[in-house]
Image (tube, rainbow, N blue to C red):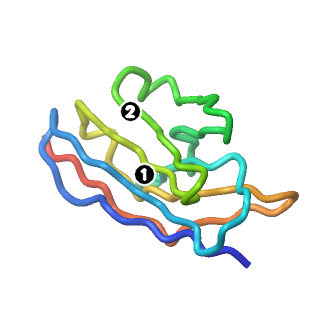
Amino acid sequence: QVQLVESGGGLVQAGGSLRLSCAASRSMLINPMGWHRQAPGKQRELVARILSGGNTRYADSVKGRFSIFRDNAKNTVSLQMNSLKPEDTGVYYCYGVRGLKDYWGQGTQVTVSA
């Protein structure tokens, strides 16, 4: 079993920045790693993901504002969120895939006030 432990999140004004971090509890290849988010009343959606080789994918709504990074040696993934908008508000979940199994963090709240 692998646990994904998130940190970061919080309340920020529109235009501000936040950084989310996620660490895997065991040293094993988890690929890809990334972040999903869920806004109230909406389905969970992919925000960004990154492969161990560095290939990234972003939701159209966050391109140019968010950046995802990973440290393969430490099995961590981070999400730098800039120019935040109220519509970025939601619970952000770290996730990772190993083999056929998905792993999820407990979620961290991000609230962007207008």
Q: Which residue is mark 2?
A: 66
Q: Which of the 4 image quadrants contains residue 57?
A: top right
> Nearest the camera: 43 or 4?
4
Q: Is residue 35 visible?
A: no
Dot 2 crowding, Cα within 10 Å, few <14, some 14–19, many 20+: many
The Cα atoms of the two marked residues, 2 and 1, are separated by 17 Å
User: Quadrant of the rendered structure where residue 51 is?
Assistant: top right
Picture layout, residue 43 above or below residue 65: below
Q: Looking at the picture, which amino acid does disc 1 mark?
A: Ala
Residue drawn at x 53%, y 30% is 59
Residue denoted by label 1? 39
The answer to whether residue 65 is above or below residue 34 is above
Q: Upstream in the sequence, badge 2 or badge 1?
A: 1
Report the residue at 44% width, 23% height from top: 63
Residue at the right extreme, as displayed? 100
Q: Residue furthest front?
A: 73
Residue 92 visible, this angle = yes
| Location of residue 89 with respect to 58 vertically, above or below | below
